[in-house]
Amino acid sequence: MRAGDTDRIVTLSRSASGRPILHEPSGHVSISHTGTLLALAHADSAVGVDCEMRRRERPWLEWAERYFAPYEQGAVAEAEDP
């Protein structure tokens, strides 16, 4: 299936664990959604995709100072958007 194909039917079902199974066309698929975002990956081998909405601000530096090694704390402190 290529971009622009409008006459193809895609057949999906779910495994017992809820993972999507792509029957036609064949291949592996992963689907993720949150809020107004949707991500879909299709590949010849196992694939995974995840999308998440940014939630509230987190105390990254405080957590880093508590749980991380000093060099990791420095990387978090220097990051523009940890």
Image: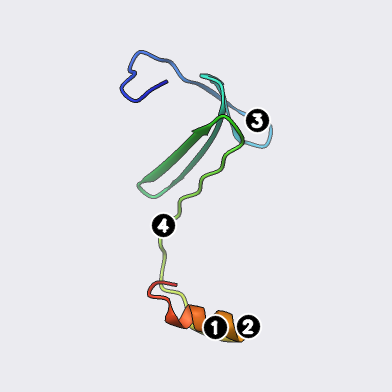
Query: Label 3: which residue?
Result: 15
Quarter that holds the C terminus: bottom left
Q: Are circles 2 and 1 on residues that touch, CB within 8 Å? A: yes
Q: Are circles 3 and 4 on residues that touch, CB within 8 Å? A: no
In the rendered view, tell whether residue 17 sits above or below residue 50: above
Question: Is residue 20 shown left or right of residue 58?
Answer: right
Q: Secondary structure at mark 2?
A: loop
The amino acid on which the numbered mark 1 sits, given as a three-letter code, is Gln
Question: Is residue 82 shown left or right of residue 19?
Answer: left
Quarter that holds the N terminus: top left
Of pointers 3 and 4, the one earlier in the residue sequence: 3
The amino acid on which the numbered mark 2 sits, given as a three-letter code, is Ala
Instruction: Judge the density around disc 2: few (<14), some (14-19), many (≥20) Cα neighbours within 10 Å.
Output: few
Distance from disc 3 to disc 1, alpha carbons, whole Å, reads 41 Å
Of pointers 3 and 1, the one earlier in the residue sequence: 3
Query: Residue 22 location in percent, x, y?
Result: 55, 25
